[in-house]
Image (cartoon, rainbow, N blue to C red):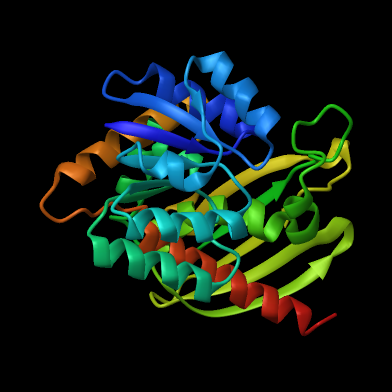
Amino acid sequence: MRFGLFGTGYWAAETQAAALAAHPDVEFVGVWGRDPAKAAAVARRYGVLAFGDPDSLLGDVDAVAVALPPDVQAELAERAARGGRHLLLDKPLALSTEAADRVVAAAESARVASVVFFTNRFQPNVDVFLADAAERGWDGARVTIFASIFQPGSPYANSPWRREKGALWDIGPHALSIVLPVLGPVNAVAAMLGPHDTSHVLLRHESGAISTLALTLDAPPAATTHDVAFLGAQGEVAVPDGVGTAVEAFGIAVTQLLGAAAAEVPEHPCDVRFGRDVVAILEAAQTAREAWT
């Protein structure tokens, strides 16, 4: 399948482009970015074309991978889907449920395959754990992810959308991608903002389970932690850390998108419909959090 890449930042160049270039069933055609110089640099690195505008790239490919800010991604993904291009998108799908709904409608209308890349969901040991956990009963989950990405030397330190939207929108999708497959849909959301721009989110699932999320991108370096666990009659069971690199995980996502595209009904557990549900929860949490400020 012929793939194009939208995006030229660290994640695009180091993860997505590397995985596309290495995949045996992909022809990596080219890249487009908002900065032509960066697009040219990525293109030279991987021996592909640098396109001057998104529509030119869309005209030469069957599928697109996107590594752009969520609001930019949503618009381009909708355009790509309406043109019949399969979608390999980054999280979050969009920054509003309304924008996410437009992507879903375009993908469903064109019957294109879609995958939203939540890194841990494409690490095989985590996938096996979640499949097993979904077969058991749980009272809830606890997620504490304190990152510190704004330190000197971090490749994401100067990310404008992350500084504006914070961990709720950057880390929140990762947390929900683990919690939702096990505890099920959410029907109530509460949230508050704490020190270090920490979002504290309380979710009630339709199953009756309760999950709590504590998320920040700006923790003191000594306070960074990554703790995800399910709680129930069997005790507290931690979700394992993913095994393998982000490039390997993205390669698995590419393979699964190819499989979905070949199916009569192009579906995937992490398709744009799931991505839309994640956005709806994040938007509800943002609204609830703002009510307390």
- On-image quarter of the C terminus: bottom right
Q: Give the residue drawn at x 49%, y 14%.
A: 47
Q: Is residue 206 above or below residue 177?
A: below
- On-image quarter of the N terminus: top left
In the foreground, 224 or 60: 60
Task: State whether residue 231 appears in this view.
Answer: yes
**In the picture, residue 159 is in which quadrant?**
top right
What percent of the width, then of the height, locates residue 104?
A: 37, 66
Left or right: 37 in relation to 273? right
Q: How many marks?
A: 0
Q: Is residue 223 above or below residue 264?
A: above
What percent of the width, then of the height, locates residue 291?
A: 77, 85
What percent of the width, then of the height, locates residue 284?
A: 60, 77
What percent of the width, then of the height, locates residue 53?
A: 54, 43
Residue at far bottom of view: 291
In the foreground, 21 or 234: 21
Residue at far left of view: 264
Left or right: 285 in relation to 233? right
Q: Give the residue drawn at x 63%, y 45%.
A: 227
Task: State whether residue 121 appears in this view.
Answer: no
